[in-house]
Image (cartoon, rainbow, N blue to C red):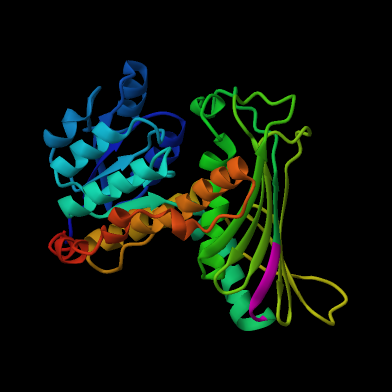
């Protein structure tokens, strides 16, 4: 019988609480290490993980035998964590975004590929049942997508105890922490890369965030799909709003909730048809699927999904929005790649194949 994969979790804050629950419920995984500078956070996590070892520093990664590390930490300040994981030759599952700059994220990707360790970024929205069903509707009911409107409106009270506090003071918090999910979904669902981005970011007068919490952007994808995007963390109404409508060759797909409420209609239909989706618990089922995908990669039974290298393409959309805002012009994200980044990954495949015998 295959032994459970041993996991070290770095970062024991709000997001880690979901991971502790998901991992402890998975018989194919076992938490052996916990890292956080907060003694209170370590004690809380140790109570949930009998037999695990806890430490304040990532030196633990080279001291405790493990099969991979999960970085449930903020995107800023991960360099020592990445260095420790790569030095220990531990595969990495990292919360998104990988870093708070594209250049640093590219450095991390190169670091992992040179060390020959798989690096997966937790783009959990790809694993939502509603996302998977949307893709199938294009293939079976409404035809090829041509244009779309994506609207996300939220009053995100960043002062709540259950939420991480660092977005309150970071640059472009909406883009880096929320829109990155949406941009990744656009690439994933429409199966194409952006070739033009025109964006405006701003902060309403009542915002609690130090930098822009509102994003408006127009994306043109390589396959011709055009997306009008609007996202905000500081909608001035506590009730959330979400609508993702895709116009297709034979009809329309309409998602009315970030985690479900999916409908479609053909051109001549008088009403929308509701799409049945499986039961879903927010932040849990998607994390279960993410973990299972990474475990399958390490077992050698599935390819690496949401790789760090692929993640750079979504981060380039964030970077393109920022530059477009600054310059007042349209940006092609591929023009922002450096020659070094185009070269990373070319020697990774053979190195990774040596690690898929876990």
On whether residue 96 falls in the magenta region, the answer is no
In this image, 250 relative to 321: left or right?
Answer: right
In this image, 169 relative to 336: left or right?
Answer: right
Q: Position of residue 147 (x, y in %)?
A: 69, 69
Residue 45 at least partly seen: yes
Q: Which secondary structure dominates the residues rendered in magenta? A: strand
Q: Is residue 262 above or below residue 153?
A: below
Residue occupying the far right of the picture: 270
Q: Is residue 319 above or below residue 150?
A: above
Q: Name the quadrant of the N terminus.
A: bottom left
Q: Is residue 56 above or below residue 33?
A: above
The residue positioned 23% from the left and 25% from the top of the image is 57
In this image, 250 relative to 193: left or right?
Answer: right
Q: Is residue 304 above or below residue 92?
A: below
Q: Position of residue 28 (x, y in %)?
A: 28, 54
Magenta range is 143-148
In this image, 166 relative to 264: left or right?
Answer: left
Q: Nearer the viewer, residue 12 or 114?
A: 114
Q: Name the quadrant of the C terminus.
A: bottom left
Q: Position of residue 164 (x, y in %)?
A: 50, 28
The residue positioned 27% from the left and 29% from the top of the image is 35
Residue 129 at least partly seen: no
The residue positioned 52% from the left and 59% from the top of the image is 332
Q: Position of residue 105 (x, y in %)?
A: 35, 45
Residue 97 picture quarter:
top left
């Amino acid at each position: 019988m295959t032994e459970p994969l041993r996991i070290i979790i770095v970062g024991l804050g709000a997001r880690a609480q979901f991971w502790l629950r998901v991992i402890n419920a998975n018989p194919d995984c076992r938490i052996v290490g916990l890292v956080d500078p907060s003694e209170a956070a370590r004690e809380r996590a140790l109570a949930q993980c009998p037999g695990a070892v806890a430490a304040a520093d990532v030196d633990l990664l080279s001291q405790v035998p493990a099969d991979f590390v999960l970085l449930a930490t903020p995107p800023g300040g991960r360099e020592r964590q990445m260095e420790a994981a790569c030095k220990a030759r531990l595969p990495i599952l990292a919360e998104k975004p990988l870093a708070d700059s594209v250049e640093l994220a590219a450095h991390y990707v190169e670091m992992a590929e040179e060390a020959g360790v798989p690096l997966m970024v937790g783009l959990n929205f790809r694993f939502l049942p509603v996302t998977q069903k949307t893709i199938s509707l294009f293939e079976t009911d409404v035809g090829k997508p041509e244009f779309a409107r994506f609207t996300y409106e939220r009053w995100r009270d960043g002062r709540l105890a259950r939420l991480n506090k660092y977005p309150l003071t970071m640059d472009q918090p909406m883009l880096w922490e929320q829109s990155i999910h949406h941009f990744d979904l656009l690439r994933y669902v429409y199966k194409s890369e952006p070739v033009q981005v025109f964006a405006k970011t701003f902060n309403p007068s009542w915002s609690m965030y130090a930098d822009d919490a509102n994003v408006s952007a127009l994306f043109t994808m390589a396959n011709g799909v055009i997306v009008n995007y609007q996202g905000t963390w500081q909608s001035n109404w506590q009730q959330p709003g979400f609508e993702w409508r895709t116009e297709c060759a034979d009809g329309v797909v309409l998602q009315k909730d970030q985690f479900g409420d999916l409908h479609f209609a053909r051109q001549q239909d008088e009403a929308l048809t509701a799409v049945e989706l499986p039961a879903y618990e927010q932040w849990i089922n998607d994390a279960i699927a993410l973990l299972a995908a990474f475990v399958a990669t390490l077992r050698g039974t599935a390819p690496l999904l949401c790789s760090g290298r692929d993640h750079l393409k979504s981060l380039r959309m964030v970077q393109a929005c920022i530059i477009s805002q600054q310059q007042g012009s349209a940006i092609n994200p591929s023009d922002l790649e450096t020659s070094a980044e185009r070269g990373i990954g070319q020697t990774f495949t053979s190195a990774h194949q040596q690690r898929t015998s876990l």
